[in-house]
Each structure stands twice: as structure tokens, then as C-alpha cells.
Image: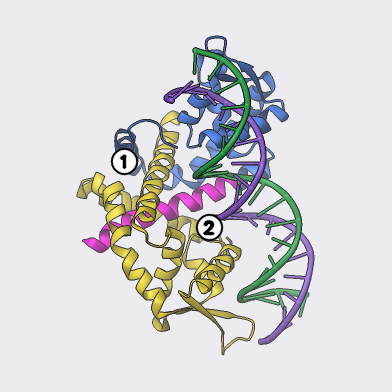
Chain colours: A blue, B yellow, C green, D purple
Amino acid sequence: VAADSTAAWRALLLAQNRALRAIEQQMERAGVIALTWYDVLLELDAVPGRRLRMQDLAARTVLSRTRVSRLVDDLVGAGLVRREPDPDDGRATLAILTPRGRSALRKAAPVYLAGIDQHFTGLLDPNERQQITRALTKVAEAHELLAPPRRR
Amino acid sequence: VAADSTAAWRALLLAQNRALRAIEQQMERAGVIALTWYDVLLELDAVPGRRLRMQDLAARTVLSRTRVSRLVDDLVGAGLVRREPDPDDGRATLAILTPRGRSALRKAAPVYLAGIDQHFTGLLDPNERQQITRALTKVAEAHELLAPPRRR
DNA sequence: CAAGATTGAAAGCTCAATCTTG
DNA sequence: CAAGATTGAGCTTTCAATCTTG
């Protein structure tokens, strides 16, 4: 039973690692934006006004505040995002999705979705998919509760 | 259904990311070796002679050949591993677990196992554990088959 | 020339320190 | 002084080039 406890964990590490690498390679070969960029743009696109404070952006992704700052630098350099001071709070900065950013996101989306399907979801039957979703969501949420504020 | 296809994937990314960070923090607080070191030492310990060629070591972990080279440098520096030329193939190098390495591994093991249990396995019921293991193992193995040689 | 391994340079990421505004 | 964000320095990881042996 103790040995079995690590079996699930090892399977998790291996599966994610391999699927992730495969998807990233596929996106690169297709000439679309990298996964980290995609994740950031996706969150901006999903929100009214297509804009978020840096901090909220970090909270929605798997990225640290510092990392988001650097990524947004790059995205601004590529013209996919622009920065603007938050009118409601002079300390905060808004990251805003540009039209070019939306377009890059739309171009990458089918590649990403196909990658997920090909290298992960499609390898499972519907039943397994649902089981995994339920169980791993439970894990992720448990961590949210255990981590008091927002520590990344 | 298309939205659901990404749900499993997102849950995977979030769950692993959070559990991994929590476990690493716990190991650091406990003053035992880091997770990457642990993984390398564990593979060496699991094999007859407690020695592996660099390449085989990389193949058993989630690490690239290059990364393993650097990690073994550090492990040698810490006295936990030693290098020796492979008598059967002059091109190859063997990484060999030292007594100090075994001891470091044994000291870290309970912390690591407790971390896995506390931040991952223990958050699931036995049924879910088994489902996850089965499904994710399937994914990991599918990738092994799809990647012809050993590409990392 | 291919396979095994290592190395230099560069990219990705994180920590602690800093700057600015509330 | 706390909160939001950025920056400098340092560690981790990867890519391509290199060295050595089969």
C-alpha cells in the first residue's frame, strides 16, 4: 500500500512531463506562440475588458508575480499586450490584450487544443477523463484552501 | 465536450504544480536533499551494483542527459555519488551511489513519502488513487511508445 | 561517422531588494 | 508602514557545439 502511494504520484509526474514536452514541441513546429504566452493571453481574453492587474493575472495562471512581470515585458515587446496604469489604484498596472494579441491567441488555439487531445485527453476513454478531472480538481482545490493568502 | 477536454488537462497542471511546490518546500524545511537529487539517488539505489550509465540514468528520470551530467557533478561534489569509467564501454561513464549517498537518501525518504501523502495521495480516496494511477500510467506509456528511441 | 558524455552560452525562473503609491 | 509592481543577481534547465571512443 505504501508502494502504491507513490505509484499515483510517479504516474502524474511522468504523464504531465511527457505530454507537456510533446505539446510544446508541436506548437513550436507549427510556428505559434509558446505555451506560457498562450496561458497569459488566454486569461486576458477570458475577462471583461480583456485586461487584468498584474497580480490577478499571476493568480489565474501557474506563474509567480515576478515571472508575469517578465512575460508581460516580452509580450509588450511583441505587440501582443500593452500596459496601462490602473485608474482605480495608482499602484497597480493593467495588462491589456491587443488586437494582435487576440489574433495570435486565435491562431495558436487549435494547435494547443489538438496537442492536448493528441498527447493527453485522447489517450483516455471518457470515463477515465472524468475520473481524472474530478480527482485532480479535488487535489488542486485542497491546496488552494491550505495556502492561506496567495503565495506563489 | 471540447471545453471538458481541457478540464482534465488544466486539473493536471494545477494539481501537480501545487503539490510539487508544497513537497519541495517541506523537504527544504526538513533539511533533506532536494527532489531532483532524491530522484537521481533513488534510481541508483534501485539497481544492482547501485550504478548506472549516465544515459540510462537520464532515461529513468524525467531529466535530460545534459541535466543529469550537471546534477551528477553536484552530487559528486557533495560526496553522494562517484564517477567511474564503464569497463565494458570506454565511451560511457558510470554514476555510482556512495555510502553517504545511500544515507542521504534514507534520511530524505520519509520526508518525501510524507509529503506525497500529505499533498497528493492522501487527498484522494483509495478508489480515486487507483483510477488516477491506471489512467496516467496509460498516458505515460503511450508516450514511450510514440517516441521511438530515447528523446529527452 | 555514430554514440556517449560533457561544456559554453543562453533562456527560463525565483528570491530578495527596491521603488512607488495608498 | 503595507500593497503593487519591477529589477538585479543567482540558480536551473536547455540547445548546440565539442571532445573522445567504438
Looking at the picture, does residue A150 appear above or below residue A27?
above
The quadrant where residue B31 appears: bottom left
- Whether residue B46 is visible to the viewer of this picture, yes or no, is no
Viewer-closest of D17 and A45: D17
Say which residue appears at 63% left-offset and 16% top-offset. Answer: A84
The Cα atoms of the two marked residues, 1 and 2, are separated by 29 Å
Report the mark closest to the observer, 1 or 2.
Answer: 1
Q: Secondary structure at mark 2?
A: helix
The amino acid at mark 1 is: Val
Q: Badges 1 and 2: C-beta atoms under 8 Å apart?
A: no
What is the number of the mark on residue A139? 1
Chain of the residue where label 1 is placed in the rendered structure? A
For image coordinates 46% across by 29% down, the residue present is A59
Q: Residue B75: where, in percent of width, then height?
A: 50, 70
Q: Residue A41 placed where, x, y %?
A: 58, 27
Q: Which residues are magenta?
A: A1-24
In this image, A67 relative to A56: left or right?
right
Q: In the rendered structure, which amino acid carries the disc numbered 2?
A: Leu
Relative to B77, does residue B9 appear above or below in the rendering? above
By secondary structure, the bulk of the magenta-drawn segment is best described as helix
Q: Position of residue B91 (x, y in %)?
A: 64, 82
Reading the image, the residue beneath label 2 is B146
Question: Would you say residue B21 sits in the magenta stretch?
Answer: no
Which residue is found at the position 56% from the left and 85% from the top? B86
**Quadrant including the N terminus of chain B:** top left
Q: Secondary structure at mark 1?
A: helix
